[in-house]
Image (tube, rainbow, N blue to C red):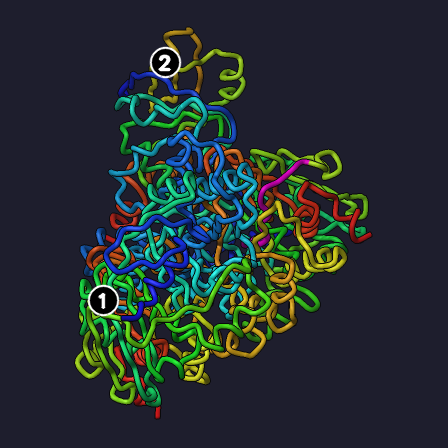
Amino acid sequence: MGKTMIMKIMERAAHKEVHVGERVWCDIDWSTARDFGGANCTLQFDEITEKQGRVWDSDKIAFTFDLQAPSHSEKVSNNQKIIREFAKRQGIKHVFDINHGIGQHVLLENGLVKPGDVILGTDSHMNLLGGVAAFATGVGNTDIAASWLSGTNWFRVPETMKIEATGEFQCGVSMRDFLTRLVGDLGAGGLDFLAVEFAGDAIERSTLAERITLCSMVTEMSGKIGLILPNGPVLEWLAGRAGPEVRSRVASIAPDADAPYIETRKYDVSKLEPLASCPDAPDNVKTVREIAGTPVDQVHIGSCSNGRFEDIAAAFAVLEKSGFKVSPSVRTIITPATNEVMRRCASEGLIEKFLDAGIVFTNPTCALCTAEHYGALPGGDVGCSTTNRNFIGKVGKGSHTYLLSPMTAMATAVKGVITDPRDIIC
Amino acid sequence: MSEILRGRAWVFSDDVDTDLIYHNKYLAETDPKKMPQYSFEYYPGKENFAKEVKPGDFVVAGKNFGCGSSREHAVYCLKEAGVPVILAETCSRIYYRNAINNGYPVLFVKGLSEAIKAGKIKDGDELEVELGTGTIKDSTSGSAFHGDAVSDLERDIMSAGGLIPYLKSKKK
Amino acid sequence: MGYTFAEKALARAVGHPVSANEVVTVEPDFCMSHDNTGPISRTFKKIGVKKVWKPERLVVILDHGVPAPSSDHAVNHKEAREFMKEQGAPHFYDVSSSGGVCHQKFPEEGFALPGQIVIGSDSHTCTYGAFGTFATGIGRSEMAAAWATGNIWFKVPESMKITATGRLKQGVSAKDFILKVMGDVKSDGADYMSVEFHGDGIEGMSISERMTLCNLGIEMGAKNAVCRPDQKVLDYIKGREKSADWEALWADPDAAYAKELKYDLGDIAPGVAKPHTVDNYAPIGEVAGTAINQAFIGTCTNGRIEDLHAAAEVLKGKRVAVRTIVIPASWNIYREAMRDGTLDALLDAGCIVCNSGCGPCLGAHMGTLAPGEACISTANRNFKGRMGDKDSFIYLASPRTVAMSALAGKITDPREAF
């Protein structure tokens, strides 16, 4: 019997053969923390080692600041300070302070992530790094502190589901819509404890941004990791950033032809239309046509799911077709995922046009993923967002959020009511 | 022989996300002892949980409890409130890890989601839970349930009191 | 005996001559408020009046927490939004790229006009004196009352005359000058007064520099601060005036002043206001070498394009040593900085350039300080805990000094660059 990608990744990290269902101890390539949960990790580490402990490998730890960058509360500022001081004390050089952007994206852009890496982070969307076939997972502070002690952690070797996507997206439809379809089909618990391999020509052709979008939302189905084997331009980009070892890693973790999958699902993405996750759960999926006309108060484009240049450019295309004007009744906010994304938006002239249209363009940060940053909603407001969660009151008590693709979000900003982007660009 | 725990049930639906258990508004908190005051503040109808929960009360939920964020706050806020065990049909994986890593028991109880929907287990019911055997009795409704045992590794981590003490004991 | 600026402006408003210490009641030309509009509207409703006396005289510019950093802020914004709508008040600047810091947007949008009376529910409303406006900050209750009645009473203030001659030396800015003045006058030295800036030194300054001067009027306790509305001002307001009813007024040469101060700008050197008061002046040499954790360039005091240029000139081609937050005072300034390459230079240097607004100036947005941290800032207040934790420290300085200090990670004399 062959092996799936996650089995091969775990075998490399556990230095032994692994079997589905068993618990294995894996060496950790990166153990990271953010200003979200990061101080909890460092305080816990200091407590259990009575401030005497050294981390197992200061070159394998990274800190990123994105929850509140810059911070707007004394508590978060203090947490950031605690992290900076811990990093200094422990000789941890990889500190990506408030001027960088969303953690996983920053790690990726800085060439720190290779296919097959085992990566921990205090972010449930760490697994978007599965977009380059790294096994990255969100964990709590105890898991992080434990890995800093020992350099390892335990995992159950998961069963794998294979999802094959073929065909080409129609005009106005994007990877985000495919993902929303999946969340709707599988439900919030549909991938609990499972790994997923995404394959098929639609995946093979997809950009890095699209792969990130797809893998980021595996969390919303409670999956462990979604994996896509780097190929084509994505592989070239990654090798350019993280070095030539990327190629041999890809070869070593490619799934076997007879790998065991508990289920294979097939989708033809050319049959999809724009979709939305309606309030108040990601798996409450409807077509945009069904909810078109719903008035909204705010539109937010960004986050680790859809904050890359390609996402912002897709929104830009919709705005361009609309004469660069958003509805005055809607507050529209765009947050790039990283500084690199922001710079590209500036140099390619996107920011200027967004500003002409009345849009607020912020510095790179997680922004509207919590009620404690840019664009928090008052009770009674309806928001549209390209983020990944719309749980009850997530970004403000008594508010409700629709999760949409960047194209649908911008079409909605233009019209002031939920709008199918095909009505504008197709 | 294992101890029988007795307490009241607080009953929750399927897919209770981490924002409902412990809202992102309070993420900057680093002291676990201060976390219980925010428990379930955003859960419709359970806003008073933090005030009214008594040590020994049980959290009873359907499928996929704790989905969403990796915040360990969502475990601490219940553990520190004195909830001795979480009874759920299933638990989201990160939440489950966070619980085990703190030596905090979660029992996976088949049929719990349907039982909750059918009203066979309700808020305020008196429960008897035997952790060793996984036996759960609702003495108010008369229903009985069975919780699954965990794997050897999880049991070892649990009985060591959590991941950190477990690793420390292995080092010796 | 001639009249001071304040006497003339208030006389114009009441329609007959007035003198210092008289009490007058006037109709404000514009009423400015920001994120506090929601609470003001609640007080307004308690008065029992349904309609604002003249809704077109309300100017509401959201800036303190934009976009809303918390649901509490969001609720306040919503209240302001709904109130403006229900009043049919047209001048509302919501969370959008037409916004910015209220004291920057207000003049940009042509509301700051010579000889007019402006009240604002923000202490730095005195900034509009740079346009020859009689502008003063008031509290929320008084603003609610003004909305209801269309009236506000003032004691005609006595005036202080500050005369500046000559030119600032290289590396020295209007901020250094006003910090020095603060150190001399002290925080209560101009209590209740109208502060007039005179002299060829002021005439030689840009509008932006004059705004920096007037902005700090309140820090001396002044009711308002003002510069002569010269040709620069007339050129600036041309085409943007939101009212035709204005008049370029200025003090008579023989007006009576309660205090007079004279400075030669050539004597001014870089300086800072040390924690925790704005009048705690120190020449840069005294604090040079003090370690800092954060640098902040922005606000209604020093967030304009000239300020960003000064910072970029220092930072270009180099890397900051501490986290450096840059917040253009308005989106127009942001765009200008983007077009002329300033934004790139700042980002290349490692600065974080945020969206326009008040930012961390008042400790509730984009760059709050942790305990024990020190920040060097171009803002106007360094009160204990103003930017965050009560055990943090704020040094106020010019954009150039802040940028130089950001490079070194410690307070640094900007003249070292030359």
Highlighted range, magenta: A294-304
Residue at the image position 35 percent from the left and 42 percent from the top: B26
How many numbered discs, if any? 2
Which percent across, then down, holds residue A422? Answer: 79, 48
Q: Which mark is residue C278?
A: 1
Q: Residue A152, located in which quarter of the rendered image?
A: bottom left
Q: Residue A293, located in which quarter of the rendered image?
A: top right
Q: Which mark is residue B124?
A: 2
Label 1 marks a residue whose chain is C
SS at mark 1? loop
Residue B109 horizontal side relative to residue A413, left or right: left
Foreground residue, C197 or A334? C197
Residue at the image position 28 percent from the left and 60 percent from the top: C19
Label 2 marks a residue whose chain is B
Task: Identify whether A102 is placed above or below B137.
Answer: below
Residue C92 horizontal side relative to residue A260, left or right: left
Answer whether residue A146 is visible to the viewer in this image. no
Which percent across, then down, holds residue A237? Answer: 63, 71
Q: Label 2 vs label 1: CA separation?
A: 59 Å
Which percent across, then down, holds residue C272? Answer: 24, 75
Which percent across, then down, holds residue A411? Answer: 70, 49
